[in-house]
Image (spheres, helix red, strand yellow):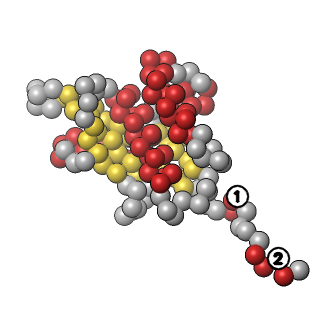
Amino acid sequence: SSSDQFQSIPIQSLPPLICYTDGSCQMMNGKGISSGIGIYFGPSHPLNTSKKLNGPRHDSGIAEIIAVQTSLKKIHGWTEFSNQPVIIRTDYLGIIDAMVDGNYGRFSELYSDLKRSVEKFPNGITFEHVIAHEGEDGNEEADRLARKAINLGAS
């Protein structure tokens, strides 16, 4: 029939959107602690992010969670997002424990918020653990963006 020519592309055939996230927390020349996030999708990708975090609490765990939360908000609001599978790669095991196994620990409020963000994606989010500083380009780039945010105060 003529309707066959309008069949939609099955969602599984779209390649996944892979995002590397990283949070960094550093002592700044004895002037207190500063933290930042790095989000990396690929070379020159419009959603790549390097952002300094403001706020009273600076903790690398918090920065890691905010990096993932920020990446999901950016993906969800991106006009080119077509509900393809999303893979978040992080070197922070706490996120894997919370999102995969439900172990929220001391950041339960942040993880509850993150879970709500994940639920906005009809096809879910896959969380994958990568080993830090093992030469995986995406992870190295996310780390570089997070550290750059702290050192340059980028927003």
Of mark 1 and mark 2, the one earlier in the sequence is: 2
Q: Residue 61, can we see it?
A: yes
Instruction: Spot the residue most to the top.
Output: 106
User: Mark 1, mark 2: which one is toward the viewer?
Assistant: 2
Write the residue at 56% across / 21% down: 103
Name the residue rendered at 29%, 45% in the picture: 51
Q: Which mark is residue 12?
A: 1
Within 10 Å of the Cα at label 1, are there few (<14), some (14-19), or many (20+) other Cα atoms?
few
Give amino acid for label 2. Asp
Q: Which residue is mark 2?
A: 4
Which quadrant holds residue 106?
A: top left
Residue at coordinates 60% horizontally, 46% vertically from top-left? 121
- Horizontal side of 56 relative to 143 (left or right) equals left
Residue 65: x and y, percent?
42, 33
Q: Quadrant of residue 8?
A: bottom right
Q: Position of residue 130 (x, y in %)?
A: 49, 40
Q: Position of residue 84 (x, y in %)?
A: 61, 56
State the SS at label 2.
helix
Above-or-below relation of 119 to 55:
below
Name the spot of residue 137 as percent of width and height, x first. Answer: 41, 52
Q: CA distance from mark 1 to mark 2?
A: 19 Å
Mark 2 packing: few (<14 Cα in 10 Å), some, or many (20+)? few
Residue 5, picture quadrant: bottom right
Residue at figure coordinates x 70%, y 58% from the top left: 12
| Disc 1 secondary structure class | helix
Q: Is residue 113 above or below residue 11?
A: above
**Image quarter (top left, top right, bottom left or bottom right) of the N terminus:** bottom right
Placement of 79 over or under 100, stated as above or below: below
